[in-house]
Image: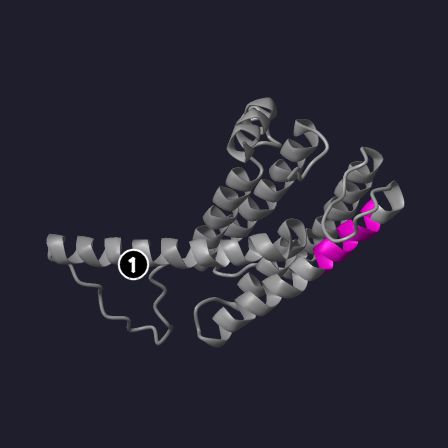
Amino acid sequence: MRYFPDPISGWLFLGALTIVLGIACYTDELYTKIPKWLTLPALGFGIFFSVLRGLLMGLNGKSVWLLSNPSPAMGALDGLIFALAGLVTGFLIFFGIWMLGGCGGGDVKLFAAVGAWLGPYLSYLVLLLTVILLAFCLVAIIAWRVLSGRSPKPDTTGRRRVIIRFAPVAALAVMLVALWTYRFDLGFIDTHTNQNTEARNDR
C-alpha cells in the first residue's frame, strides 16, 4: 500500500509532524503542559495534510482509504474522512488514558490532532508501542534505582510526582510507527524489490 504519491511529499509530511512533536516535547518539559496554541494548529495542519495527500493520490489514480474510485475530488474527500476518523480514534484512546491518570489534558488534545495526521489504524499502533515503551522505561528506572541503591526523594510540594513524561514517549512511538509504515514511500526500501518479493511469495 502506498501512502504518498512520491518520497518528497512523504518527507514533507514527516518533517512537519516531527516539528509539531518536537515543540510539544519541549513545552512539556519546560512548562509541564502542552498549550492550545500548538494543539489547535496541529489539528488544522493534520486535516490539511490528509486532504492534500488525498488530492495528490487522486491525481495519480490511487485511492487513499475507503473510497475506491480515485479522482482528485474523491481523494480529497477520502483524506478528510481519514483525518476525522483518526482524530476521533486518537481522542478516544488518549482520553481513556487521561481518565486513568496516565497523561494530561494537553496530551489528549495533541494526540487527537496527531490522529488526524496518521489515521485510525496507526493511532492504535501508536498506543500499543507507547505502552511497550512506557513499560520498558519504568522497568529500566526501577532497575537503575535498585542497582544504584538510590531511592526517590520525598515530595514536600504536594504535587503529583511525574516519573516519566508521557509526551516524549508517545512522540517516539509516533515516529517509529510512521517511519516503519512509510518505509517504502520514503525510499528506505526499493519499491521494485518489494514488488518482486511479493510476486515470488504469490507463486
Q: Which residue is located at x 62 percent, y 64 percent? A: 89
Between 198 and 132, the residue placed more toward the observer is 198
The residue at 72%/60% (across/down) is 84
Q: Mark 1 sits on what residue? A: 138
Q: Secondary structure at mark 1?
A: helix
Q: Residue 19: within the magenta?
A: no
Percent across and percent down for residue 184 are: 58, 31
Instruction: Kindly identify the residue that appears in the image at 48 percent across and 69 percent down.
Output: 97
Q: Which residues are magenta?
A: 75-84
Location of residue 157 with respect to 184 vertically, above or below:
below
| Image spot of residue 12 (x, y percent) | 67, 34
Q: Residue at x 66, y 65 (%)?
A: 88
Apparent side of residue 173 relative to residue 1 in the rendered image (left or right): left
| Numbered circles on residues, count | 1
- Answer with the quarter of the image where residue 11 lies: top right
> What residue type is disc 1 on?
Leu
Dot 1: within a 10 Å radius of its alpha carbon, few (fewer than 14), some, or many (20 or more) residues? few
Q: Quadrant of residue 161?
A: bottom left
Q: Is residue 37 above or below residue 160?
A: above
